[in-house]
Image (cartoon, rainbow, N blue to C red):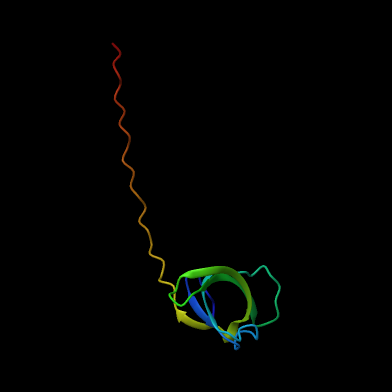
Amino acid sequence: MKMRAGDVVHLTTDASVQFLRPISVRIIRELPERITYDGWVWIEGYELDAAGDARARRELYVRREGVQLVQSAPPATPTRPTTRRPVVRTPLRAG
């Protein structure tokens, strides 16, 4: 599973033995520049409390196969390019 910014995941001992007490995390990003074992990944995200509010920013080393997707990030909505109106300058009169 490729994790995207905004995804909410549930981490248990399936993801790593460090999660004896499961946690939920809102993904900020994967950290691909860090060297890992095959099937493992570093992620950066916010640990969420029971209400779903960010509690702490964390960097976590997890087994990709053990990460459980709870809520997928909404798809990015394409933005329309803004059309700029030409600026009309009127001369000022002194006097």
x and y percentages locating residue 8 in the rendered image: 48, 76
- At 60% from the left and 88% from the top, the residue drawn is 13
x and y percentages locating residue 64 in the rendered image: 59, 82
Return the residue nearer the eye: 10 or 34. Answer: 10
Above or below for 36 versus 78? below
Relative to 83, 60 lies left or right: right
Relative to 59, 51 lies left or right: left
Above or below for 22 versus 81? below
Q: State whether residue 74 appears in this view.
A: yes
Relative to 1, 36 lies left or right: right
- At 65% from the left and 86% from the top, the residue drawn is 17
x and y percentages locating residue 49 in the rendered image: 48, 75
For the image, the number of numbered tags is 0
x and y percentages locating residue 76 in the rendered image: 41, 66
**Which quadrant is the N terminus positioned in?**
bottom right
Residue 51 lies in what quarter of the image?
A: bottom left
Q: Residue furthest bottom?
A: 14
Q: State whether residue 5 appears in this view.
A: no
**Which quadrant is the C terminus positioned in?**
top left
- At 30% from the left and 19% from the top, the residue drawn is 92
